[in-house]
Amino acid sequence: MAYMVMATGFCLILIGLYGALSNRNLMRMIVAFTVADTGVNLVIVAVGYMSGRTAPILDAAVPVAEAAARIIDPVPQALVLTAIVIGVGVTALMLAYVYKLYEAKRTLDIGKFTELKW
């Protein structure tokens, strides 16, 4: 199960990178970066998965003496939750920049923005 999720994550990363490198439209590039970000999150979750383990909640179901052998590490899940929040913020910032660029130039083609070229 974890290998399938990891393979799907790597495929999403590759699709996102291809989309970001092959498109000249800024909106498509943002969508491609978001797809790659989702792939990274899937890979992190797949790396942290351990079959046969339970949630890291110490109660009557998991005694403290057996906790190290029976619970799963919550750090990858916490990292993914943090990465999701950061990814949404970065995507919103990219969309705001693209909106302002479109207002200024009336185009989304990255080749038309030549002011900073050498």
Image: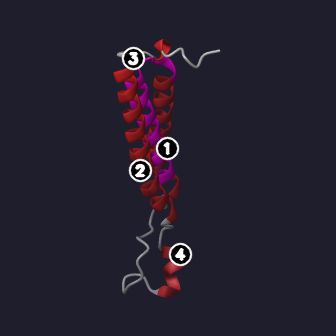
Q: Could you tell me how far apart the alpha carbons at marks 3 and 4 are, in whole angstroms?
A: 59 Å
* Amino acid tagged 1: Val
Residue 25, labelled with which disc?
none
Mark 1 or mark 3: name the one nearer the start of the chain.
1
Q: Is residue 61 visible?
A: yes
* Amino acid tagged 3: Lys
Magenta highlight range: 21-46
Q: Is residue 24 above or below residue 69?
A: above
Residue 69, labelled with which disc?
4
Reading the image, the residue beneath label 3 is 105
111 left or right of 99?
A: right
Q: Could you tell me how far apart the alpha carbons at marks 2 and 3 are, in whole angstroms?
A: 31 Å
Reading the image, the residue beneath label 1 is 40
Q: Could you tell me how far apart the alpha carbons at marks 1 and 3 are, in whole angstroms?
A: 33 Å
Mark 2 or mark 3: name the one nearer the start of the chain.
2
Decide: marks 3, 4 in contact (CB < 8 A)? Answer: no
Reading the image, the residue beneath label 2 is 84
